[in-house]
Image: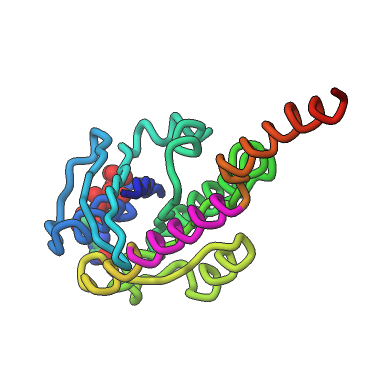
Amino acid sequence: MNDVKLAVLGGEGTGKSALTVRFLTKRFIGEYASNFESIYKKHLCLERKQLNLEIYDPCSQTQKAKFSLTSELHWADGFVIVYDISDRSSFAFAKALIYRIREPQTSHCKRAVESAVFLVGNKRDLCHVREVGWEEGQKLALENRCQFCELSAAEQSLEVEMMFIRIIKDILINFKLKEKRRPSGSKSMAKLINNVFGKRRKSV
Ligand SMILES: Nc1nc2c(ncn2[C@@H]2O[C@H](COP(=O)(O)OP(=O)(O)OP(=O)(O)O)[C@@H](O)[C@H]2O)c(=O)[nH]1
């Protein structure tokens, strides 16, 4: 059984809860409690693998205070970074979050493999009042090795589901890469035994 931990981050009111709730329940409620953080749990079967998925949806007020993201970076296997296409300041916030996640210091000391990141331009149904171009989102994502899409939590249930499934698949690929890079337990134990006893035998 794989445990997959996903953090949904972004500026205030960008639709983090709407996206998460849409994925988990296929519903769009419209108003979501925003004064507390939540960890949602879901059991999933993906590519014949059983998964325990945890999705962290922070409270925006505390998120601002904790901009260092230290605990999220330790906890999460992947990140969905959300901005609102009708709010330029939320795009600047998303950019800062991505830079923080991709900081060489952060990615090198804590991770053997770079975290999976999905940049999401939400509220696509509001494109008549758009402030952030599709190309800008795409460029930011490309430059920082992230996946990217624009969608509407309000109107596009399937797209929301596909986005979550894609990042979960990326996380599973990263798990495999980490496994490959780590010397297997039995091999390294054999090496150790060989080093200790093999050498001694020779000297006797
Ligand atoms: N038009 C439109 N409104 C949306 C969409 N997604 C979310 N909203 C609205 O945006 C507002 C904020 O949504 P939330 O899901 O609470 O956003 P949040 O990022 O979790 O908010 P905080 O936790 O307060 O930062 C709510 O009024 C939602 O109904 C969308 O795709 N289109």
Above or below: residue 22 compared with residue 2: below
Scheme of image coloration: rainbow
Q: Quadrant of ligand 1?
A: bottom left
Q: What percent of the width, then of the height, locates residue 67?
A: 49, 35
State the residue at coordinates (27%, 67%): 161
Check the image and name the residue furthest to the front: 204
Above or below: residue 152 compared with residue 97: below
* Residue 166 in which image quadrant: bottom left
State the residue at coordinates (53%, 71%): 138
Q: Assess whether residue 175 is covered by the magenta stretch.
A: yes
Check the image and name the residue furthest to the right: 203
* Residue 145 in which image quadrant: bottom right
Q: What percent of the width, then of the height, locates residue 171?
A: 45, 56
Q: For the image shown, how many numbered marks are present on the structure?
A: 0
- Residue placed most toward the observer, 50 or 189: 189
Look at the image and tell me in which quarter the C terminus lies. Answer: top right
Above or below: residue 96 compared with residue 125: above
Q: Is residue 141 left or right of residue 124?
A: right
Span colored in magenta = 165-180
State the residue at coordinates (12%, 57%): 29
State the residue at coordinates (19%, 54%): 21
Q: What percent of the width, then of the height, locates residue 1?
A: 31, 49
- Residue placed most toward the observer, 151 or 52: 52
Q: Assess whether residue 19 is covered by the magenta stretch.
A: no
Task: Examine the residues drawn in magenta and state their main secondary structure.
Answer: helix
